[in-house]
Amino acid sequence: MPKKASRGAKPPKARTAGQSSSPADQKSLHGETAKTADLAGDTVGPGQILSSNQGLKISDDQNSLRAGVRGPTLLDDFHLREKITHFDHERIPERVVHARGAAAHGVFQVYEDLSDLTMAGLLTDPSRRTPVFVRFSTVAGSRGSSDCARDVRGFAVKFYTDEGVWDLVGNNMPVFFIQDAIKFPDLIHAVKPEPNNEIPQAASAHDTFWDFVSLTPESTHMLMWVMSDRALPRSFAMMEGFGVHTFRLVNAAGKARFVKFHWKPLKGVQSLVWDEAQKISGKDPDFNRRDLFEAIERGDYPEWEFGLQIVEEQDEFAFGFDLLDATKLIPEELVPVRRVGRLTLNRNPDNFFAETEQVAFHTGHVVPGIDFTNDPLLQGRLFSYLDTQLRRVGPNFAELPINRPLNPVHNNQRDAMGRVTINSGRVSYFPNRLGDGCPMHAPGAADAFVSYAERVDGEKIRARSDSFADHFSQATQFWNSMSDWEQAHIAEAFAFELNQVESEDVRHHVMNEILVNVADALAQAVSEQTGIAVAPVGTAANPTPSAPTPSGPLKPKAKRLSSPALSQDKPGDTIKGRKIAILGGDGVDARQLKAVTDALTAEAALVELIAPRAGTIADSAGQSQKVNRAAVNAPSVVYDAVVVPGGASAAELATSGLAIHFINEAYRHGKPIACIGEGRALLDASAVGKVGAADGVVVGETAAAIEGLMAALLQHRFPRRAIAGVPA
Ligand code: HDE
């Protein structure tokens, strides 16, 4: 076995744990010849000679074997056949959902001993650094789709604990569309591209999705999240994560409590805006993936605090909703999130396929001290994930380096496609005498898993508890908790999606069986932007509901619900990792350029100098400055803010359509704009110049402009700007 520290402990490019990578294991696999084999991986390096998979040195790999230089290729070219056939088989099935993702290694450490709550070793020993592998994903799109689709983000964490692997397979939203796993194939069929023409890719803005949700009122709360800016994370490092279901923590005395798991990003929760996200999808479809990779490469490690919401068993029914219902969250104001540990991602995968693609999460992977509840969504997931890995990665998926536990595996499972372990001996059954009764059971061992002995008693029925029936109150709570601009973005998102829907029937039902039950203001705003009339159920225009499980209208007291913790309208406390464009050119003011660059990099923000062409420019002091990107390669949408220094370049930029577009677009997307001295010429030439003073638009001399810029960056975006007259 590899040393534990080799998995994500710290940047040194330690190889991902692989049972066969250590000399001891090589020996057990291949006897004395093992020293030549390194099954854990092969890095291209000096002195290596090209060989076939059979170990044969290859003299020429660029010309196939032919009969004469212009003759046919010969069938006995075994090297050509091996190379091409291996290539033909390079792809494995993409994930049926969450196909597009990016991942990183890291480490988790708990702050204090939580043994009062759980016996899980990773949560009781503050000195333990548990290696992790975390994969973020979008749900609906294919592997090659854009990062910035409006969608839920997966947030799946594999903890390689001393007691075995724990997979916490969560999302960046705390609730889900459906209450029962049996509906999942329907939900996914509805949201995926339509089956007749495979359109649209990675988008919920089409008829089948809205048809389904209009008939599934339990999805309303989740719809609110997906139509909010939470569905457009600025960075994986700037989104929250949630275990979604209610789980159980069990301590060594056997006492259980309910728990909701949270991840709180130390960079704060920040989003894109919809127009920006759509444009990034074309300009840089790898936007979030690139951000994650580059941040880790430069040592700006994404971090989250791990949070627990604990509910005592006797309080199971204290909330007015069912803890087993995954369409509900527990407001943080009712049960505070206790921050108990930290996750740090500090190493990029070496190989996307071997790690990010082949990693196989399974909600059934828990460790002693963590257990399930009867949430019917979770219960379905418990078999779905194992099933999907068997099909997608294969029956021996758990043997792959990225999926292996740190501790040894001994059992009587054998064979199947792609088996790596060479089990010796003749015993592969239990009970046995020939193998000394091994591998033995561990009934009394403190670190053995024993399911929580929950009492289960019930009739075999297909029915849902009445306590799952209120589908609108928490949707309204979400709406009530939003600031004015967040509500505006939600209404605009519903309108955008419904304007893509062709069926008037579907549009009508979404409005009159879903939105009217969330909030009048929401229904009204969407109606104005879509032309769909508001005609609630029971009125002459809409006499009967069509949803088979109507929740009934909004409960009057829900109108007062609010959970301020849900709003993103909070200034951040760091600008680490934000990307700022400096628009320059020959003659750019040298002192201003240096001052603003120094101020931003001192705060670990990223600065890119953009000029009309790549290469270098000469600043006002005659010094050569490296251009990071040529203007045509540098759209405003991939930056968080823009700075225009003075100098001779400013007047030239003021005549550039690209530069004017850059400013207009950054303004529309609410981004900080800072013009230093003569840099204001570009602002005046843009449509922003006609708007007059606006939040987050800073004009001044060097020190004042930098001060204003830094404050504006902490605010992230200025979504209340008047943008109607600004084209982009
Ligand atoms: Fe998943 N989900 N899911 N899901 N899910 C998969 O497993 C499934 C659900 C989530 O980065 C699949 O390996 C069912 C909720 C993430 O590899 C599959 C149901 C939550 C990932 C599957 C749900 C999630 C998946 C597809 C309804 C948040 C990506 C490929 C009961 C708590 C993991 C795979 C990765 C992936 C099934 C609902 C999160 C098919 C049946 C709720 C983050 O097994």
Image (cartoon, rainbow, N blue to C red):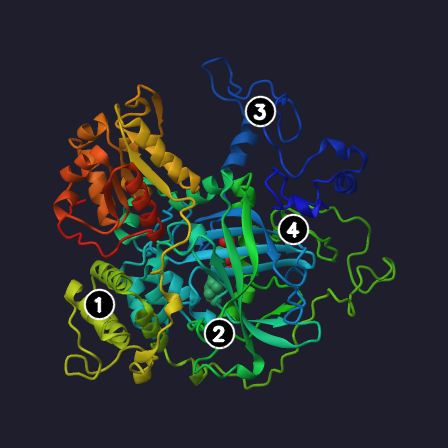
Q: Earlier in the sequence, mark 3 or mark 4?
A: 3
Q: Residue 76 carries which label?
A: 3
Q: Earlier in the sequence, mark 2 or mark 1?
A: 2
Q: Is residue 144 above or below residue 549?
A: above
Q: Kindly tell me whether mark 3's CB lies below 8 Å from ligand 1.
A: no
Q: Earlier in the sequence, mark 3 or mark 2?
A: 3
Q: Earlier in the sequence, mark 4 or mark 2?
A: 2
Pointer 3 with pointer 1, Cβ within 8 A: no
Q: Tell me how far mark 2 sits from mark 1, CA to CA.
A: 37 Å
Q: How many labels does the image show?
A: 4
Assign a secondary structure to mark 2.
Answer: loop
Assign a secondary structure to mark 4.
Answer: loop
Label 3 sits on what residue type? Answer: Asp
Label 1 sits on what residue type? Answer: Arg
The residue at the far top in this view is 69
Q: Would you name the residue on which mark 1 appears?
A: 507
- Tag nearer the camera, 3 or 1: 1
Which class describes the residues within 10 Å of circle 4: few (<14), some (14-19), or many (20+)?
A: many
Q: Would you name the residue on which mark 4 appears?
A: 404
Assign a secondary structure to mark 1.
Answer: helix
Residue 616 at what x, y percent from top left?
33, 22
Assign a secondary structure to mark 3.
Answer: loop
Q: Which mark is residue 487?
A: none
Q: Is residue 281 visible?
A: no
